[in-house]
Amino acid sequence: MINKAETLIINRYLRPKSKDNFLKLITNFSFLGIMLGVATLIIVMSVMNGFRIDLLDKLLSYQPHISVQSKGNYYDERKIILDLAIKNKIKINNINIVNNSEALVITKKKNFGVLIKSLNLDEIKNNYFLKNSIIKGKISSNTIGMGSEMAARLSLKIGDNISLLTNNNETTPFGTFPKQFSFQVGFIFNTGMYEFDNNFLILNLNQSKLFSNNFNQIEIRINDPDKSIYFINILKKGFPENLIYSWIDNNKTFFNALNVEKNVMFIILTLIIIVAAFNIISVLTILIKNKSKEIAILRSLGFNQASILKIFIFTGSMIGIIGTLFGVVLGILVSNYLETIRLFLNNYFNINIFPSEIYFLNELPSHINYNSIIFISFFSIIIVLIASLFPAISASKLDPIRNLKND
């Protein structure tokens, strides 16, 4: 390791004398470059993680985590799914049989498409998106449920009728026409999600055959959505002939785009750290040039090449390590108070860096992933060590006789 003499020399080199103003300036720039590079990388990664989590919450608020095509024996299939979950320590929060279909709402003023979810009558109240959401009316077998936004758009209330045109056809003497049905509004729900409350209708599962010939789906929500792929692989062994897919399959293009953007931003911002690390090469090169006589004297006093190598590697590395530590602290602080900083800039300087009308989010999302911070820190330190290595090797190979002779 490092002995006391080497430690003393490293401390002296890290505090340049007043006459070495240029060296001190480059050292400070190297320190600031690494600190700001690491802090910026942490802040950007935290914001992108926040965006991902926020968008994921919105998407999964009305999507199942896993969908299993039912072959008709729902209660047997349900029991197998629950047994597999218990066996593999997967916590299931909700499981329902659903039939998804489409229809066209027909009114005197406008026609528009809607999505229909047909559920078992006894499962509607406990469904993940309808739980505690029914604000008016009651569930019954022959009525239909609609969102509060759709009810307001159509000016409908409990007891009113709604006409739906389906994609199932009927043959008449005048040709083939889509079937039309009329339903009474039995209940109105408000989930707090505009897209769902404005576009979905809820029906009894027995009525789903009126609208489509689609297979019923067993919709599953688990405690940890990130374990969906793991649980799907287990379910495929229990249901080899059933079509099984997850929320990741439904949103693959969207999340692939997010991951590509995140990786590109990481690569771009890493360049800041690399540029700052090159400044360390400049610092050590100038330091070696200025201290060549001292290096020659140290070699004459018994310091070997390994000692000189350690002195300059640690000198350069300490600049990078301290810069990295300060960058981590700054990055975490800014990430934690990002929304406060945004509001301050908006209120006092009228700088709106995150307009909600464009991004459809009320606040700037930020989520600190400490595993990412550890990775960024190690990555920064490795770059600094590599940058310090080349000048240090150069210093260790200086010929003491030639340097003393020239001086």
Image (cartoon, grey):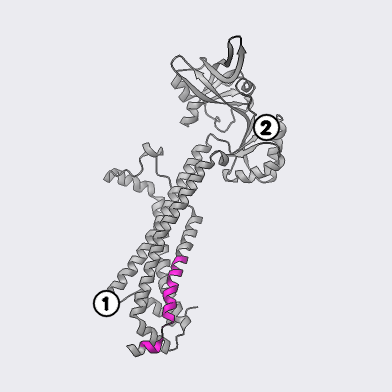
**Residue range (magenta):** 382-403
Q: Nearer the viewer, residue 219 or 100?
A: 100
Where does residue 262 sit, x and y in percent of width and height?
46, 50
Q: Secondary structure at mark 1?
A: loop
Where does label 2 land, which residue? Answer: 70
| Identity, as a three-letter code, of the amino acid under mark 1 | Lys
Residue type at numbered disc 2: Ser
Q: Nearer the viewer, residue 360 or 159?
A: 360
Disc 2 residue crowd, few under 14, some 14–19, many 20+, Cα 10 Å: many
Residue depicted at x 57% and y 43%: 225
Q: Residue 347: within the magenta? A: no
**Which secondary structure is most common in the magenta stretch?**
helix
Q: Residue at x 41, y 79 (%)?
A: 395
**Number of marks:** 2
Q: Would you say 13 lies left or right of 195 here?
A: left
Q: Is residue 367 visible?
A: no
- State the image coordinates of residue 381 (x, y, percent, origin top left): 46, 65
Residue 297 lies, with reference to residue 51, above or below; the image says below
Q: Is residue 102 visible?
A: yes
Q: Which residue is at 36% across, 43% downward?
A: 354
Percent position (x, y) of residue 304? 46, 85
